[in-house]
Amino acid sequence: MRNSSLKESSLSEKVLFSFLALAALALPFDGYNVFGIGSLFRVIGLVISYLLLFSLLINSKIRATFITNLRSPIAITLLAFVAWSALTSLWAPNTSWALARVFTYLGLLGVTFAVSVLPLNKVMGLWYIMLFGVLVSLPLGFILPHPNPLLAESGRFSSGGKDPNDYANLVVIVFLISVFGILPYTRGVSRLLLALSGWLSLIVVPLSGSRTAVASVFVLTLLGWISRGVRGMLAGLLALTIFVAAISFLRETESVGKYYETFLERVQSLGDVGSENTWAGRIDIWRAAWYVFTLNPIGGVGIGNFAWVSPEYSATAALMASMREDGGGGVAHNTFLSVLVETGVIGFVLFLALQILLFLRLSRLYKRHALARGLLLGLLGYWFASLTLTWEYVKIPFFLYGSILAFERELLK
């Protein structure tokens, strides 16, 4: 009887891991609209949620693991944030947009808790697969045209149908977790291949022209090297030398050279940080977001609804709305400000508490566990991206949340 139970547990984990692996592989490509139903990740995420519910019903081991994870302050705060965000849809001016965001959160919660019930070695395997997906997407970015003609003509590289900033910051987070969190657990040829793959993926950063990704990878890679002592710094300097040499070689090619020139122009623009042009209209939208928050300080304007009301308060957002069929304007372009304006002080406090809990849990284990170091750097990479992107509802942080819950559970055993 016991062997039968173990086989069921193993089968449930394998099936769940298989679909999570597909989701991780599809993550760099989720900018494409597949057959008019949205990204491939959306379909896979729905299957994962159903598989998790089914596994909880039939598998006592997964059920016990899930209950253990639910007791974590991280899980409780995450659920409270999503629940409050869903509640704000009651007063959102555009209910359909609000409900769409609620269903997105519910799907991502399914992914989070599905990741969290896996054994830690399989969790690390998901990040391997995600890095492989990034590597596959890299050459495809040169071959397949971007679905947005404006981005295709911008002189900035991207892939998977994603915005260049989204794509580059996703790559940075995957790089940080893979190289600083998982690489120390590998040996031999696998270690070498993982290191080379990680550094190769970083070519995306200068090609994309994402200034946020440049700042993120510079600061956090340096922090990762320092945390590993003298050997880590020497290995990092060697990797950096090889990386710079590769970029210098590639910039001479026609396919890469045009992106390199755009990158230099965008980096040089950081010398004038007070200019509206440098921030591509974000300052105007940030002012509008703060003003809308002052009108709805407790509950916010409603989840997913700042883009609906922003044209009334921002000239930049109004211009965006004129080019969109649905009449929506600009999002907040800052995750923390977006949460504040859409879910009010209550939602903001819950979201901030979640980030603090994640940080505290990982920072206490930073020196003792390489995986904690990688996950913490990945979390900081998410924070960097959140300063200029509306990323509270994207997929990558929910993989992070699930990985941290799994890591926390393993330590409590």
Image: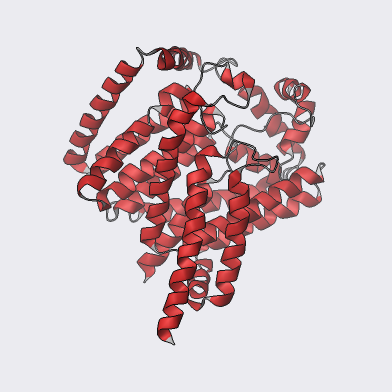
Q: How is the image coloured?
A: secondary structure
Residue 61: x percent and y percent? 47, 75
Query: As drawn, is 297 to the left or to the right of 198?
Result: right
Q: Looking at the image, is 63 positioned above or below residue 297?
A: below
Residue 224 seen in render: yes
Q: Nearer the viewer, residue 205 or 343?
A: 205
Q: Looking at the image, is 8 positioned above or below residue 281?
A: below
Q: Nearer the viewer, residue 334 or 244?
A: 244
Residue located at (55% from left, 31% from top)? 388
Residue 184: x percent and y percent? 25, 49
Quadrant where the C terminus is found in the figure: bottom left
Residue 37: x percent and y percent? 69, 43
Residue 355 seen in render: no
Q: Looking at the image, is 408 positioned above or below residue 324?
A: below
Report the label total: 0
Q: Quadrant of residue 174?
A: top left
